[in-house]
Amino acid sequence: MRYKLLLLFFLPLLASAQQKFTISGYVKDIANGEALIGATVFVKEINNGATTNEYGFYSITLVPGTYTVQYIYLGYTTDIKTITLDKNTPLNIELTSAADQLEEVVVKGEFEQPTATNLEMSTVSLSMKTIMKIPAFMGEVDVLRSIQLLP
């Protein structure tokens, strides 16, 4: 009974002690050697990956096996590599720009000047009777105060 309990306790530790290796490297532009910041490095078999940092560096730790790795960056051709991982593998990638030339775009339009027919903003009319109904201050009706009380 004790041995079974010990085996159940140590079995997960043995399973997690599986050897892992790392694929790492830089993703750069083939034309000028500039680091491609934020390029996606995607491993199809595990449906996961990483992005490159500000130096174009990436690192992915995997268990030994054969993997298909995609290197993707917007505006560049996607590079696909098949890697057999049995040791730590440095893999530097250079992507080619996929600049497609677009046709000329001509935008035509006409602008019609809007004509204002009524330039009057908003108007509020107050009759003298309405002003006299406003509470007086020191015996007199304040006209400016009546304007402030308007909606």
Image (cartoon, helix red, strand yellow):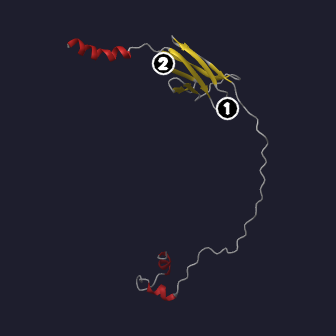
Q: Which residue was labeled with disc 2?
A: 62
Q: Which amino acid lies under the numbered mark 1 shown in the image of this protein? A: Gly
Residue 39 vertical position relative to residue 88 in the rendered view, above or below: below
In this view of the protein, which residue sits in the foreground, 110 or 42? Answer: 42
At horizontal 51% and vertical 12% (from top left) the residue drawn is: 88
The amino acid beneath tag 2 is Leu
Q: Which residue is mark 1?
A: 75
> Is 64 on the left-hand or right-hand side of 38?
left
Give the x, y percent position of residue 114.
72, 67
Where is residue 63 drawn, in percent x and y? 47, 16
Q: Which residue occupies 55% across, 79% down? A: 124
Say whether residue 52 is visible. no
Question: In percent of the image, x 77 and y 45: which residue is there?
Answer: 105
Dot 2, how many residues are within 10 Å of its Cα: few (below 14), some (14-19), or many (20+)? some
Label 2 secondary element = strand
Image quarter (top left, top right, bottom left or bottom right) of the N terminus = top left
Image location of residue 71, percent across then percent down: 60, 25
Q: What element does badge 1 sit on?
A: loop
Residue 123, placed above or below residue 17: below
Q: CA distance from mark 2 to mark 1?
A: 28 Å
**Relative to 20, is 134 above or below?**
below
Q: x%, y% of residue 143? A: 50, 81
**To which quarter of the image does residue 92 belong?**
top right
Q: Is residue 84 visible?
A: yes
In this rendered view, identify the residue nearer to me: 30 or 105: 105
